[in-house]
Amino acid sequence: MFTFSLISQNMAARLMGKASGAILCDKATYNASRTRISFKTLPSILVKGKQDPIEVYTPLRELEQSSTAIRRNKDFGS
């Protein structure tokens, strides 16, 4: 678990360095949230510490069914 966390933090730092004010995320983040958020696929980029380019995405908006599900969960927990 510690190794995974360190790898994730390192990737986040690398993407922040390339973002130029945008929000960038890697494939793992995309896969974990693509049912709730709409993304635009960007051209792959090279980052320090990786030999091959990585796939990069930027979030566009929350998907409609996700908003409803979140509201229901909040109402249910009240």
Image: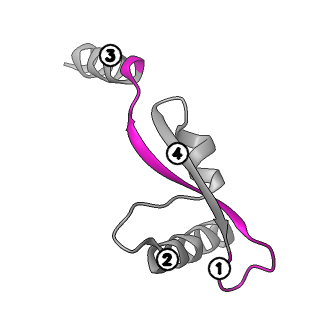
Assign a secondary structure to mark 4: strand
The disc, 3 or 1, on the residue closer to the chain's N-terminal end is 1
> Which of the two marks, 2 or 3, is nearer to us in this view?
2
The amino acid beneath tag 1 is Val
Q: Is residue 42 magenta?
A: no
Marks 4 and 2: in contact by CB < 8 Å? no
Against 69, is 26 above or below?
Answer: below
Residue type pointed to by label 2: Lys
Q: CA distance from mark 1 to mark 4?
A: 19 Å
Q: Whole-percent x and y of residue 9? A: 53, 72
The residue positioned farthest toward the right in the image shown = 51
> How far, Cα to Cα, is label 3 from label 1?
37 Å
Circle 2 residue: 18
Contact between labelled residues 1 and 3, with CB atoms less than 8 Å apart: no
Checking the image for residue 68, the label placed there is 3
User: What residue sits 25% from the left and 22% below the top?
Assistant: 74
Q: Is residue 61 above or below residue 71?
A: below
Quadrant where the N terminus is found in the figure? bottom right
**Which sits earlier in the primary sequence, circle 3 or circle 4?**
4
- Disc 3 versus disc 4: nearer the observer: 4
Q: Earlier in the sequence, mark 1 or mark 2?
A: 2
* SS category of the residue bearing label 2: helix
The residue where tag 1 is placed is: 47
Percent x, y of residue 77: 26, 20
**In what element is the residue under mark 3?**
helix
Give, as a single range, the part of the protein colored magenta: 46-65
Which residue is at 40% across, 42% downward? Answer: 60
Mark 1 vs 2: CB contact within 8 A: yes
Q: CA distance from mark 2 to mark 3?
A: 33 Å
